[in-house]
């Protein structure tokens, strides 16, 4: 029996308009990634990565995402992430921060990146109770993420 080998990409999204969209989730980013694969690699790339390319985690407060792909498609997935320029009609640029074979290392890097963005003041910090609860909820979702 052969083990299914995954690669996890830690990606940071930078919005061109500088605004934060807290309603954005994994689904629109996943769809934008699949559109990027289709545009850049055609039907072959779409068929190759359609089952394996998945956004496992996205935090709209820090704009950090974890994308899962197969080991065989890691280079194509990295290119598709890098060439992603629009999500839900909003212009953005993406930075591939880390690639790992284990989700634990990807989680550590995502936490480190989120912490840096939070402490540097890039993230707006309203002191409302709802905001703090949602931020903590995303943090707990990241910690509970399993392969």
Image: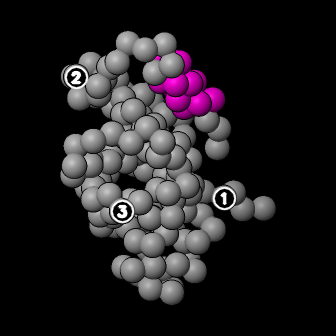
| Disc number for residue 89 | 3
Please name which of the two marks, 3 or 2, marks the residue nearer to the observer. 3
Q: Which residue matches tag 1?
A: 4
**Label 3 element class:** loop
Q: Residue at x 47, y 17 (%)?
A: 132
| Disc number for residue 29 | none
Along the polypeptide, which appears first: circle 3 or circle 2? 3
Identity of the residue furthest to the bottom in this view: 43
In the image, taking residue 138 as reference, residue 62 lies left or right, namely left
* Quarter of the picture holding the N terminus: bottom right
Residue 39 or residue 132, whichever sits in front:
132
Label 2: how many residues lie within 10 Å, few (<14), some (14-19) or many (20+)? few
**Label 2 element class:** loop
Quadrant in the rendering for residue 94: bottom left
| Span shown in magenta | 132-144
In the rendering, at what x and y percent does residue 142 appear? 54, 31
Label 1: how many residues lie within 10 Å, few (<14), some (14-19) or many (20+)? few
Is any atom of residue 89 visible in this view?
Answer: yes
Q: How many marks?
A: 3
Q: Where 52 sits versus 59, above or below?
A: below
């Amino acid at each position: 029996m052969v083990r299914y080998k995954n690669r996890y990409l830690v990606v940071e999204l930078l919005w061109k308009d500088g605004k934060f969209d807290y309603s954005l989730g994994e689904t629109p980013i996943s769809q934008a990634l699949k559109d990027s694969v289709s545009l850049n690699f055609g039907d072959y790339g779409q068929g190759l990565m359609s089952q394996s390319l998945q956004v496992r985690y996205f935090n709209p407060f820090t704009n950090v995402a974890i994308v899962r792909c197969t080991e065989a498609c890691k280079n194509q997935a990295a290119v598709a992430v890098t060439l992603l320029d629009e999500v839900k009609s909003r212009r953005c640029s993406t930075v591939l921060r880390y690639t790992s074979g284990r989700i634990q290392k990807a989680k550590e890097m995502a936490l480190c990146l989120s912490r840096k963005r939070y402490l540097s003041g890039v993230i707006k910090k309203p002191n409302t109770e709802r905001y703090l609860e949602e931020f903590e909820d995303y943090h707990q979702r990241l910690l509970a993420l399993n392969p």
